[in-house]
Image (tube, grey):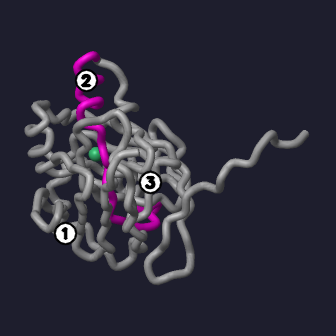
Amino acid sequence: MSSLFDLPPLPQVPVMGSDDTFPVRRIFCVGRNYAAHAAEMGVEVDREAPFYFTKTPWAICHTGSTIPYPLETQNYHYEMEFVVAIGKPAFRVGADAAMGAVFGYACGLDMTRRDLQLAAREKQRPWDLGKDVEDSAIIAPISPAQGFDIAGQRIALSVNGEVKQDAHLTDLIWSVPEIIAHLSRFYHLQPGDLIYTGTPAGVGPVVAGDVIEGTIDGLAPVTLTLEAPE
Ligand code: MN
């Protein structure tokens, strides 16, 4: 037997200070993980358990890219996020052991067709059209976990140089080990899995011509430029 056609290779993310690359397997995204962002979206934070949506690996888009304003939306939003890169298998791990599965961290953008996400939410439908957008999982090079302390780091985003989001990683409702422990009850987490851990308050729309820059202290920044739609 032979394959009918070839697929492109999985996306690879550069690793800081190395020639190595990190191949992407799955993309998990945490919803409503900062209280102020949940409030601005008009929803309550669920303190019982985190929830997730996913993007396909093909949604990966490298920092520094210029992309067309996406299809079928009038309200494309930025969401700055702290991304966790899984480097070792994790299945039914406790929060105390969860950090052993982490390879590193990166700045990421969970770009969102907000109009379609909210329309789906209204009708109690899945969020895929709003969230699993082509080129919507922007990611900067991954920094190895050794030497990076999550506590207290500032997470911020600006559009055309104007600060829109400004918070700290200590504002996360569900911490990184809590998220990994919880996800590992439902999935056999594997090397190559990425977790976008949610966005702080201050989300908003972009238009063609806008330049987005997201930063987290101690990590490589993530940038994205929007151009005219196709
Ligand atoms: Mn998000």
User: Which of the 4 image quadrants contains residue 115?
Assistant: top left
Report how far apart the C-alphas of labels 2 and 3 lie in the structure.
Answer: 27 Å
Q: Amino acid at mark 1?
A: Gln
Left/right placement of residue 112 relative to residue 151 reads right
Residue 32 lies, in percent from the top left, at: 22, 40
Q: In the image, which disc is placed on residue 153?
A: 1
The answer to which of 41 and 224 lies nearer the viewer is 224
Viewer-nearest of discs 2 and 3: 2
Q: What's under tag 3, amino acid-wise?
A: Leu
In the depicted view, which residue is nearer to us: 179 or 143? Answer: 143
Q: Residue at x 31, y 48 (%)?
A: 111
Residue drawn 27% across the image and 76% down it:
218
Task: Determine whether label 2 and label 3 are within 8 Å by CB.
Answer: no
| Whether label 2 touches label 1, CB < 8 Å | no
> What amino acid type should be assigned to the residue bearing mark 2?
Ala
| Quadrant in which ligand 1 is drawn | top left
Precedes in sequence: disc 1 or disc 3: 1
Q: Secondary structure at mark 2?
A: helix
Instruction: Write down the region rendered in magenta.
Output: 99-123
Estimate how packed mark 1 is, as few (under 14), some (14 to 19) or many (20 or more) residues with alpha carbons within 10 Å: some
Marks 2 and 1, how far apart in space? 34 Å
Q: Secondary structure at mark 1?
A: loop
169 horizontally vs 192: left or right: left
Q: Nearer the viewer, mark 2 or mark 1?
A: 2
Q: Is residue 106 magenta?
A: yes
Residue at image point 38% right, 61% down = 66
**How packed is label 2: few (under 14 Cα within 10 Å), some, or many (20 or more)?**
some
What is the quadrant of residue 20 in the picture? bottom right
The residue at which mark 3 appears reads as: 194
What's the mark number on residue 119?
A: 2
